[in-house]
Amino acid sequence: MNKNKSSQSTPDFILIAVILSLLLFGIIMVYSASSIWADYKFGDSLYFAKRQLLFATIGLFAMYGVSQIPYHTWRYYAKPILLACFVLLILVLVPGVGLVRGGARSWIGVGAFSIQPAEFMKLALVIFLATYLAEKQKFITSLKQGFLPLLLLIFTAFGLIMLQPDLGTGMVIVLTCFILLFVAGAKISHFIFLGLLGVAGFIGLIASAPYRINRITAFLNPWEDPLGNGFQIIQSLYAIGPGGLFGLGMGNSLQKFFYLPEPHNDFIFAIVAEELGFIGAGFLVILFFLLLWRGMRIGLSAADKFGSLLAIGITSMISLQVIINISVVIGLIPVTGITLPFLSYGGSSLTLTLASVGIVINISKYCKI
């Protein structure tokens, strides 16, 4: 690794080009997927596309601004940021403060817009863990001194998110944190212990909310309940199947005509596959692979341990979300409610993801790759 923290070079332009390509692709697909729904609900086929463009613009300014902040700055504010996110996670559960959407109390209204505290917690935990593990890496091999205290912190955040409930975001947070612990040198035996704990927790989650077993049943055989729990998966597959190699053509989706619920959100990848076919969906997946490659390479080439863990954590966070979303859409895993980064409609997720990438871009300025 390059130990000279003070010397800066140019940012990773390949990463920037990939992000801009994904953003442009996303805005076009949000318009295509949402135009019918937007015209029916708001009388404006561009309603969601215009808002997504606004979110993307705000996010790009955030990405640029954050990319100008030396990444070492974040380690000094890791604890206050984490504490603020815990406060927001508690506030969102308070009736009258938290807003209920899609059956989950996950939002806090701010004027005409709203924020999702769980999205901020993802980044806050990555920054905190990168700081802690860079400074106290020797403790990570100790179950009592390092591993268990961090698990308590991670699962406290997970528990608050599950009270909303938001299993998808909770999964991304936990898996991202586990990757950071593994990269930092946690013992394999600790992960075996964690796996046993996870099985018990999974059983507990199902027991506490029986609807989750219905989602799993729907995933295994969605045609068993085609108008209920299996509806989204079936409609998603009906979109992907006819797409074939080249797709039906941009704007020619049939599933967006009120068959696939809100196609501009979690299931936008299905519309991509329907309209642009295997070629278009494959191109999108390649862009995400490029993002993973550049982010991990920046992490492995970072000037110090903190920068390395921070870049790997942020890249893992985004990549896991992509993997989970696409896996849901093509029917590999149960529905989780996870958005597709840079493509799915939404303000909090898009803006925060772009700001997170801004940190990775700043880290790349101190790398030789």
Image (spheres, helix red, strand yellow):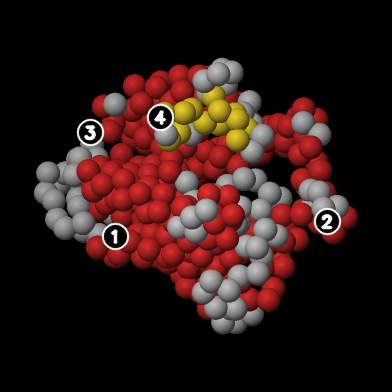
Query: Circles 2 and 1: CB distance less than 8 Å?
Result: no
The amino acid sitting under disc 4 is Gly
Query: Circle 1 sits on which residue?
Result: 16
Q: Nearer the viewer, residue 263 or 277?
A: 263
Q: Residue furthest bottom?
A: 246
The amino acid sitting under disc 3 is Thr
State the residue at coordinates (26%, 27%): 76
The location of residue 139, given as percent across then percent down, is 43, 28
- Residues at marks 2 and 3, CA–CA distance in whole angstroms: 51 Å
State the residue at coordinates (59%, 65%): 271
Query: Circles 3 and 4: CB distance less than 8 Å?
Result: no
Mark earlier in primary sequence (4, 2): 4
Mark earlier in primary sequence (2, 1): 1
Query: Circle 2 sits on which residue?
Result: 226
Mark earlier in primary sequence (3, 4): 3
Q: Residue furthest front?
A: 43
Mark earlier in primary sequence (2, 3): 3
Q: Nearer the viewer, residue 237 or 287?
A: 237
Q: Residue furthest left?
A: 7
Q: Secondary structure at mark 3?
A: helix
Mark earlier in primary sequence (1, 4): 1
State the residue at coordinates (80%, 30%): 207
Task: State whether residue 360 is above or below residue 248.
Answer: above
- Residues at marks 1 and 3, CA–CA distance in whole angstroms: 22 Å
The location of residue 311, given as percent across then percent down, is 35, 47
Confirm whether residue 192 shows in the render. yes
**Quadrant location of the C terminus in the rendered image:** bottom left
- Residues at marks 1 and 4, CA–CA distance in whole angstroms: 31 Å
Query: Circles 4 and 2: CB distance less than 8 Å?
Result: no
Badge 4, how many Cα within 10 Å: few under 14, some, many 20+? few
Badge 2, how many Cα within 10 Å: few under 14, some, many 20+? some
The amino acid sitting under disc 1 is Ile
